[in-house]
Structure formats: C-alpha cells, structure tokens
Image: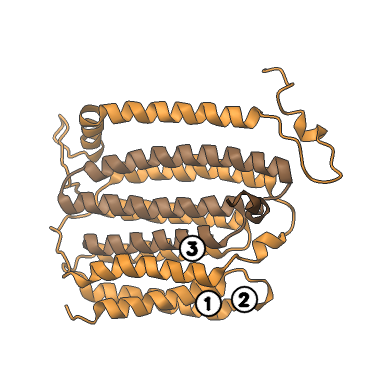
Chain colours: A brown, B orange
Amino acid sequence: MPGATEYIIVGAVLFALGAVGFLTRRNLIVMFLSTEVMFQGVVLNVVAFARFHHNLEGQAFALFLLVIAAVEAGLALGMIMLLYRRKRTLDADVWSMMRG
Amino acid sequence: MSDLTPYILYLLFAAGAVAVYFRMPRGKDSKLAAGAIFGIAALVGFFALLHTRIAAPVDSRWYFYLFSAIAIAAAARVVTHPRPIWSALYFILVVIAVAALLVLVGAEFVAIALVIVYAGAILVTYLFVIMLAQQSGSPMYDRRAREPFAAVVAGFLITGVIAGKIAESPPVALPLIELTSVAVGVETTSAGESDNTLAIGNLVMVRYVVALEIAGVLLLVAMIGAIALSRKKIPSEVFGESATPLGQLGKEVDPY
C-alpha cells in the first residue's frame, strides 16, 4: 500500500499542473477548469493526511472543500457569461486593461 | 533509501515540465510527438521511482500506480488541449481517477461525493457555459498559450519544492489495510458493519455542525449571487452589434 508520501507527491503534481494551466491558458473557461484540477490535488492531499493521522478530520475537510469548489464554479461561470456578453470573446487578454 | 531520490525526482519533474511545454498550444511550432515521448518517459520513471520507495508491498499499489498515472496524464491534457470541450472531458477523467485513489485510502464517502458533485454537477455547468459561449472552430486564444515557458518553470518549482522536500524524508509505512475494510475512523452500525459514511456523518453533524451550517449559508449566498449576476443587463461593447438579442434577457423581462 502506498503511504501518505506518495499521495502527497501525486497531489503536488496535480496542483502544479493546474497552476501551469491557470497561468498559460487564455480561455477563461479553461483557466477555471485548471483551478478545479488544483482542487483535486488539494483533496488528495487532505485525505492522505487524514489517513496518515488515523482520523477523519481530513475527509470532513474535503467535504467543505467540495462546497467551496461548487460555490467558486457557480460564481465564476456566472461572471464568465457576463464578460462574454460584453466582449463576445472568452479571451482573458481582452480584459488586460484591468491590470493596475 | 539513498540520498539520490530527490535528485532523480527533480530530473523526472523536469522531463514532465518539458513534456507539458512541448504539448502547449503554441501555434505552428508545437512538438506534439516529442512532448508525448517526454511525458510517457517521465510518468514511467516516476512510478518506477515510487515503486522502489513503497514501504509495504501490497497488491493495491498497482491500483495506485494505474489511477495516479491516469490522473496525472489526464490533468496534463486538461491543461494542454486546444479545445475546451476536450479539456472538460479530460477533467472528468481526472475526477474519476482521484475518486478511485480516495477509495484506496478508505475515503469512500468523499470519493462518491467527488464524483457526484464534480463529474455530475460542476462539469455540467462548465459544459453549459462552453455551449453558450464557445465560438465555432478554434479561436486564436485557444491556439496560442500565454508565456508557456515561464509558467512551466513556475510549475516545476512548485512541484520540486513540495515533492522534493517530502521525498527527502524516509518512506512512512502506513499500517496495512485491506481494500475491503475501512479501518480509518471505524464506526460500526447496529448490524456490526464498519461504515465510513456513518463515521463522517457523526463527525460533520456533531463536531463541525456550525461549519456545516455556515457552508449551507455560503451556498445560498452564492446561489443568490449567481442569479443576480445573470439577470443583470449587459450591453455588448462589440462594434457593429446591436445589444438587443441578448440584452433582452436582462432587467426588462418579467420574472416567470
């Protein structure tokens, strides 16, 4: 049985892949899909730690992570639709004037 | 446990980073075949390294290799695929593989919740938005990534710092748990069966009940926020396009 270490490494790889996607992709939808990939890495991490410490706290925490992910997806997709209706494109670079 | 392990791990992560960089949509000069070769080599090396480190050899480790390989490869495709609809479908594969990994550590309830909430609900919302907003064909912003090299270096650093540091520690042998039993946080039902869902229910409804209520309020707030956002009237700023067709969906429409 792989131990917590292997799970944490796989979780770290998923998290980094999601971060790379968020930084590189210019499509708003794919950017938020990448954040969901990062969420998967974090869920794997907390459940592995729960197993490591022999309790269920991490699994309960993963449930709350699911709530946050659902909230984030709902609001983010609503905002993406607003931005799309205004500019008729999903390109994130169109909004670069929002940089300070 | 030799001291070389972190360095081998860094090397494998570097190969994976090269693979992701080659697979990134970069217009004409994408090196897709080379990227695939680097990616497969990195995955094989990664699991060969893990195989030497596993402290307690049990049959379920093969499932671990299989599902984590699927998760990592599918996540790489989510990030690099030029078509968003394929990214969403590959993301479902990531969710299912991660759920299988959670089952392997005895988190059945979280695994099923993950499949229902992610693959069932969130992904459907994403597919709706892709259907509503995606232009036909493959637009320019999907074919050219932004600063792929810098981002890949950043991802390599994140993974290297987290995983390389962890790999320096000796492997931790967790107590053996067979696939069929849930030994983590065991609660037994009245019939005497062990039940992961029962144990999580006890924990969430007793110790974390306030957090649970707050989570419910948060969901309500997000729902109201999403409805308010989508009912707002947004004029199109695109030149030469009248705001009427989609603009009519806004304030002037009577509810129901």
Residue B128 showing in the rendered view: no
The x and y percentages for residue A2 are: 23, 63
Residue B176 showing in the rendered view: yes
Q: Are marks 3 and 2 in contact (CB under 8 Å)?
A: no
- Looking at the rendered structure, the kind of residue marked 3 is Val
The residue at 40%/26% (across/down) is B217
Q: Are marks 1 and 2 on the same chain?
A: yes
Left or right, B240 with respect to B11, comes to right
Local SS, label 1: helix
- Residue bearing the label numbered 2: B30
Quadrant into which the C terminus of chain B falls: top right
The residue at 42%/45% (across/down) is B115
- Residue bearing the label numbered 3: A20
Q: Are marks 1 and 2 in contact (CB under 8 Å)?
A: yes
Which chain letter matches label 1? B
Task: State how far apart marks 1 and 3 are (Cα).
Answer: 16 Å
Q: Are marks 3 and 2 on the same chain?
A: no
- Residue bearing the label numbered 1: B35
- Looking at the rendered structure, the kind of residue marked 1 is Gly
The residue at 75%/35% (across/down) is B235
Packing grade of label 1 (10 A; few <14, some 14-19, many >=20) is many
The x and y percentages for residue B238 are: 79, 45
B211 vs B22: above or below:
above
Local SS, label 2: loop
Q: Are marks 1 and 3 on the same chain?
A: no
